[in-house]
Structure formats: structure tokens, C-alpha cells
Image (cartoon, helix red, strand yellow):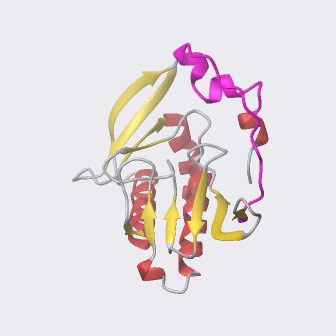
Amino acid sequence: MHSPSFVSEKNLPAHSLCKSLGLRTPSFTPTLVPHNHPILSASDMPLSVRVLHTPGHTPDELALWDAGEQMLYVGDTLYEFEPIMFPNEGDIRSWLSSVDELIAVVMASCTPAEVLINCGHRTAMRPALDILHSAKQFMMDVLLGKEKARRRTVKRGVEFVEYMQAGGRYRMQCPERLVEEARSVVRMD
């Protein structure tokens, strides 16, 4: 489920936005691990944390599941009160599948109602199932036309659209093409 080409030396300048911002691209060699990969301690002892591939926001998006602490860390996959951002390389269909996978991880825990979620920007220590289900519902409302575009802009030559839920709990900004591609699949379901 991961995308090695997304973080390749050749593609990293564009995908990291360094190229468009005129910044020097950092040099590093990523370590690619399979989905549900355990994180080991310095002494190679397994910890209660696993790496989950959650493509959608970007092809290489990751989440961390800490079963011992009942914590889900989802990075930029989603959050409340800040726009969920999708760059050109994003994919809303993959995002929906990743959210379903995260819900399944939480549901498989010993106490799903007690699992908390931490997101990359604003949402922290909140009930995971509530956030995952409500963010997915917002996205479905966008795709089904229940949420209307509030703003259109052009970024790096691409038409972006913004949707915002009443009250502002969820917002999304992405290339309009991503919404159209996802709508074509949702209408067929």
C-alpha cells in the first residue's frame, strides 16, 4: 500500500514542495516498511506500536497505532477545525478506504470506545470513533453534493476547491479533480 516512488530521490523535490518553494530538498534514504509493521525498541524488543499505511492525503501517509496506550496517531489524514488538505497527489477514494481501515483497527481493540485519536495539527486526545466516523460522513456529504464548494482558488496552476461544514468542524481543500474522480465512484456504488 505504500508508494516508494512518491518519496524517491527523483520525485521528492516536487512532492515535498521544496521545488515550488525554492528550498533545497533534504537528502535522506527512507525506510519502507510493510503495513502493520511493529516498531521495535533500541534493543529490538517489540513495542505496542505499529505502523499503518493510510494513503489518501498523500500516497505515503502513515498512521501509528499504539495498542498499549489505546492511541491512534493519524498525522495529516484528518483533523477538526483545520482544513483536511489533499495535494495533487492525493486520492479521496484511497482516503475513504484508509479511514475504514482505521475504524477497523479501533473496533478490533479491547475497548473501542476508549481509544483516542491524535491528529497532525489541531485534534488531540479525542474519541477516535467519533472523529473517524464524523470526518468520513463529512467527506461523503461532499461527494454526494450535500456540502457545496465555498471557495475556489488556483495553487501551482491547479484549480483547488474548499468545502466547509456548517459550524466549521470539518473543512477540506483539494484539487477539484480529486472530488470529481471520487464522485464518479460513489455514484456507481
Establish if 71 lies above or below 31.
below
Q: Residue furthest front?
A: 43
Residue 50, x across and y down, in percent: 66, 65
Q: Which residues are magenta?
A: 8-37
Answer left or right for 52 relative to 83. Answer: right
Residue depicted at x 66% and y 45%: 60
Quarter the C terminus occupies:
bottom right
Residue 130, x across and y down, in percent: 38, 70
Establish if 38 lies above or below 170.
below
- Residue 104, picture quadrant: bottom right
Q: Is residue 65 magenta?
A: no
Residue depicted at x 53% and y 71%: 103
Q: Residue furthest bottom?
A: 110
Residue depicted at x 77% and y 58%: 34
Answer left or right for 8 relative to 148. Answer: right
Residue 56, x across and y down, in percent: 59, 49
Q: Is residue 25 magenta?
A: yes
